[in-house]
Amino acid sequence: MIPLRFVPAALADPLAQPLLTELAAEYAQRYGPTQETVLAWLKSSPDSEFAPPGGGMLIGLLDGRPVTGGAFCRYDADTAELKRIWTDREHRRRGYARALLAELEAEIAARGYRKVYLMTGDRQPEAEELYRTGGYTRLSEPLPALGPVFPIAFLKALP
């Protein structure tokens, strides 16, 4: 197996665009309304949200091609929040998402954060399983619905 190489990126980076486009298609299929609307929402965050010192974005390259990626931003002084976690359809079930989480968590810890928070939607059982088996604890308090999405929150303390 060719190893993944992780590189820092920005939301507007060309390396991030294939993953954001596919993520938008997946979200639109599961939650609606349209891929274009979801893509505009995914890209609406300012680049500074996912930039050092409080945030970051990593893209996993396989033979130079982006196959997985994700970002984090400051949630509070001790906690980073994961966002835009994605592995393209052709490369799922190969451990790339788990490798991405490990890279993001290492970067988050290096920035001084002690915890990682994230939300996923109720129509993403694969994501729930990834986070649960990755050591994240599902938070019990219900979160308010965001339109058709019922968010599920997770938290992990970093070593």
Image: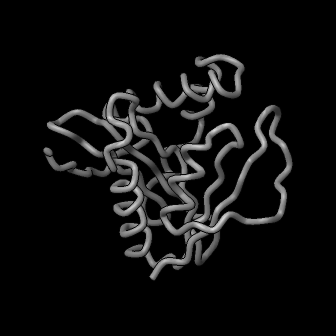
Task: Name the residue at 52% across, 79% down.
Answer: 114
Task: Name the residue at 59% across, 17% down.
Answer: 36
Task: Name the residue at 50% across, 56% down.
Answer: 72
Q: Identify the colour scheme used.
A: one colour
The residue closer to the viewer here, 139 or 113, is 139
Q: How many marks?
A: 0
With respect to residue 52, does 76 lie above or below?
below
Q: Quadrant of residue 156?
A: bottom right
Residue 135 pos. (x, y %): 52, 69
Task: Name the residue at 26% across, 50% down.
Answer: 7
With respect to residue 32, does 48 lie above or below?
below
With respect to residue 141, does 48 lie above or below?
above
Residue 15 pos. (x, y %): 31, 34
The residue closer to the viewer here, 113 or 31, is 31
Q: Identify the image quadrant of the C terminus.
A: bottom left
Left or right of residue 147: residue 53: left
Residue 138 pos. (x, y %): 68, 63
Residue 88 pos. (x, y %): 39, 32
Residue most extreme to the bottom = 159
Q: Identify the image quadrant of the N terminus.
A: top left
